[in-house]
Image (cartoon, coloured by chain):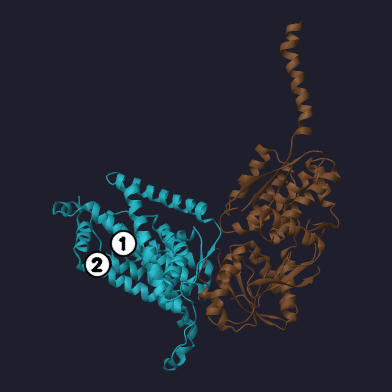
Chain colours: A brown, B cyan
Amino acid sequence: MPTLLRSFLLPAVITAAIAIHAPAQDRIKVGEFASLTGGNASFGQSSHKGTQLAIDDLNSAGGVLGRQLQLITEDDQSLAGQPATIVQKFIAQDKVVAVLGEVASSKSLEAAPICQQNHIPMISPASTNPKVTEVGDYIFRVCFIDPFQGTVMAKFALAHGWKKVALLTDVKQDYSVGLGEFFIKYLKENGGEIVKEQKYSSGDKDFRAQLTSLKAAQPDAIFVPGYYAEVALIGKQARLLGLKMPLLGGDGWVGDSLLKVAGNSLDGSFFSCHFAADDQSPVVQAFVKKFRARYQETPDDMAALGYDSAMILAEAMKRAGTTQGDKLRDAIAATRNHPGITGSITLDEKRNAAKPAVILTISDGGFKFQQTVAP
Amino acid sequence: MIEFLQQLANGLAQGGIYALIALGYTMIYGVLRFINFAHGDVFMLGAFAGFYVGPWVLRVSGLGPSYAGVALVLLAAMLLCALIGIGIERLCYRPLRDRPRIIVLITAIGVSLLIENVGQLVFGADPKSFPDLVIDRALVLPAWWGRLSALTITLSQVLVLGVTLLLVVLLRYIVNRTRIGLAMRALSLNPTAAQLAGVDLDRVIMFTFGLGSALAGAAGILTSIQQPSIDPLMGISAGLKAFIAAVLGGIGNLPGAVVGGVLIGLIEALVVGYLSPTYRDTIVFAVLILILIFRPAGLLGTVQREKV
């Protein structure tokens, strides 16, 4: 039956051949969700630039497992509800092998259960809330977690003799609430005192009411573990209302517009962070140079973490020798002493990164490296 | 006590902003009987007008950060917003004027979304730092204020209240003492009769949109002087609060809008200062619901019976 052979079998053979050969030529798809617009756009843009730079570096070095990487980026517009939809689409339509994102913990927490359920590894560049990786064994992060940042800043405050500290947290952000909790815990256990607690919601622009109430409590310092958009205005309004004590914060402060809006009103304040561009270590300086050449701007810590998240994923792919979910997961979990831009990264049994924190200070309208605090 | 008065002062300055925006809602409702949901976005455009035009105006006029500079930028932003408001009415609402009101209402929501998203595209989504039109500082209060001199009142707060007051007085004059004001009042009382008496409907509606939008533009500048971080979505919450203020005072009623705005500002400051900011919006909306239940026409409004 030559006709049947030709009309049926041949196409089938060709199809099968294509199916076998296709993976070798196909690019490895990695999904990235980030807040490219909306309230957290500054973070999302930065982490995306870092991630993209890493993917391009890997591709120009020949890719991973002999294949090129393809980064599929979707914008969640800083909106709740979007990450779930996007990750659903990554897995169902794009068939990604892994997911990278997000900066904001609340967004990562939305996406994580979906990745976990589908056994697709997810690496968050900068979500510091502990709950993120507690979702399941497919969820990782390359940054340190809230307890660490809250503890570091409480330690820092006590070391400076600031025992009466007031708190101003963003109730809409898991991140902010989390940092606040661990700050309070460490401070109280070590002889400090929380003299007043006030709250605000993301998107607020007027903080005079809260600051007025904080001022009446006369604290030595105020811990403001919020995001840059609000912190800038808080700093400005605090100085206008005559609050002269230093403000303390976490990595949420890092954003392009912080100093543009705050001017020099945040001078003398301190915050913990993942990365300092003025850190003179060769790894950091090489990254800064590469980033500047590509984007004509200095990378911030979100960019560095974005870069690290993609690199750890690629590293794991190489070690696993496959992009298959379970094996990739095991390889990521086995990451030890990865020489990242943000320091040596080891993933612990809880899939969190054990690594040092950097404390920066603000003076003359710029960030300055203050000190490193080890875990 | 000082803390309480300080909270009142803070609330008053914020309330002034709400009042200015609320006036626009209420005026447009007065002549057209519909809520212009894009009004909050005109407020945002006012802030961005100041952001782009401000530095240029200060440089060309050679004034630098100063009161005269603020006045110039304020005028420029008001003018721009008036034109934008008139444009929105001409393009989006006028073709629908004879349609059921719900269609215009939905169009207004569409216009609002359009402005917000085009705004993010054109201006960028991240917050922008508003230029210093005037150097904000805490005022040194005179000693004869006694214990009250411990209050912190900033230049921008005084400026906001002063300009708000000035604009409200000006608006009252326009509405009560000029021909076009008379036409506006006539139109809001009875559109058919006003037209029969020779009131040019298009012209009055255009004027109302221009005036209301100019006030929103002024509010945009004033709020940015106080809180110098602006973004394309800043109009959503401010617009919503001002809308509540307008309903609270009695929609369609000008003094009501001012009273409502100031009340909302004060309520917010006190709730945040003494309860929790988590309850701020809850309480503001609860106030709205209570007003709608017990005084549907608002604090200063009068109930109009629907004529059959």
Q: Amino acid at mark 2?
A: Ile
Q: Disc 1 vs disc 2: Cβ atoms closer than 8 Å?
A: yes
Q: In the figure, B189 relative to B90: above or below?
A: below
Residue drawn 75% across the image and 69% down it: A358
| Neighbours of disc 2 within 10 Å: few (<14), some (14-19), many (20+) | some
Q: Amino acid at mark 1?
A: Leu
| Nearer-N-terminus badge (1/2) | 2
Q: Is residue A101 left or right of residue A232?
A: right
- Disc 1 is placed on an element classified as helix
Report the disc number at residue B174: 2
The extreme top residue here reads A1
- Disc 2 is placed on an element classified as helix
Q: Is residue B300 left or right of residue B110?
A: left
Give coordinates of residue B109: x percent, y percent: 41, 50
| Quarter in which the C terminus of chain A is drawn | bottom right
Residue drawn 44% across the image and 70% down it: B58
**Quarter residue A262 falls in:** bottom right
Same-chain check, marks 1 and 2 = yes
Whole-number angstrom distance, CA of label 1 to CA of label 2: 10 Å
Q: Is residue A347 visible?
A: no
Q: Is residue A349 left or right of residue B70?
A: right
Residue drawn 42% across the image and 63% down it: B241
